[in-house]
Image (cartoon, rainbow, N blue to C red):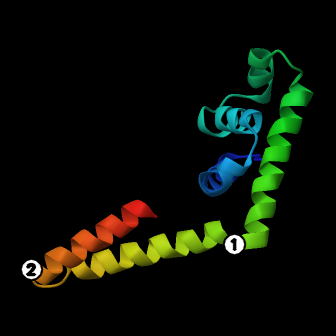
């Protein structure tokens, strides 16, 4: 389970990639915990369950996201791809003004938006 802000950011990145594999309840609780910054007690109170129950749901969801990343490495690869695209866009920005430069920047932007 995410313990601090850095952990929540990492979990959020995994959620972006693998969130669709979670149950609706796991998605809801993880969103409340990571994105809305609610405490487990607040989540539990809103869902009329115990804090321990909320903890279990968030922990299982987080464990699943981490397991999927360990098995596939997709989130890490996606991060490297995004970084490479940003580097390429920065290089393209430094090219002299031309039609080709404009097309390259447009293409890199479109690809980046899709990743």
Left or right? Give the position of 56 relative to 12: right
N-terminal-most mark, 1 or 2: 1
Left or right? Give the position of 62 relative to 17: right
Residue 32 in the image: state x and y as whole percent. Answer: 66, 31
Above or below residue 55? Residue 105 is below
In the displayed image of the protein, which residue is found farthest to the left?
A: 98
Residue 52 in the image: state x and y as whole percent. Answer: 91, 29
- Residue at the image position 64 percent from the left and 69 percent from the top: 74
The quarter of the displayed image where residue 107 is located: bottom left
Q: Give SS at disc 2.
A: helix
The quarter of the displayed image where residue 102 is located: bottom left
Marks 1/2: CA distance?
Answer: 37 Å
Res. 93 in view: no
Res. 38 in view: yes
Q: Mark 1 sits on what residue?
A: 73
Above or below residue 6? Residue 54 is above
Q: Mark 2 sits on what residue?
A: 99
Q: Give SS at disc 1.
A: loop
Left or right? Give the position of 77 relative to 87: right
- Residue at the image position 55 percent from the left and 70 percent from the top: 78
Q: Nearer the viewer, residue 20 or 58?
A: 20
Residue 43 in the image: state x and y as whole percent. Answer: 75, 24
Above or below residue 12? Residue 71 is below
Q: Nearer the viewer, residue 51 or 60?
A: 60
């Amino acid at each position: 389970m995410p313990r601090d802000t850095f952990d929540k950011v990492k979990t959020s990145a995994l959620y972006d990639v693998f969130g669709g594999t979670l149950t609706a309840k796991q998605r809801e609780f993880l969103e409340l915990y990571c994105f809305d910054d609610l405490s487990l007690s607040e989540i539990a109170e809103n869902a009329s369950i115990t804090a321990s129950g909320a903890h279990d749901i968030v922990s299982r969801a987080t464990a699943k996201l981490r397991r999927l990343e360990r098995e596939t490495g997709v989130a890490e690869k996606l991060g490297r791809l995004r970084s490479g695209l940003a580097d390429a866009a920065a290089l393209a920005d430094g090219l002299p003004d031309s039609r080709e430069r404009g097309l390259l920047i447009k293409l890199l932007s479109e690809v980046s938006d899709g990743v």
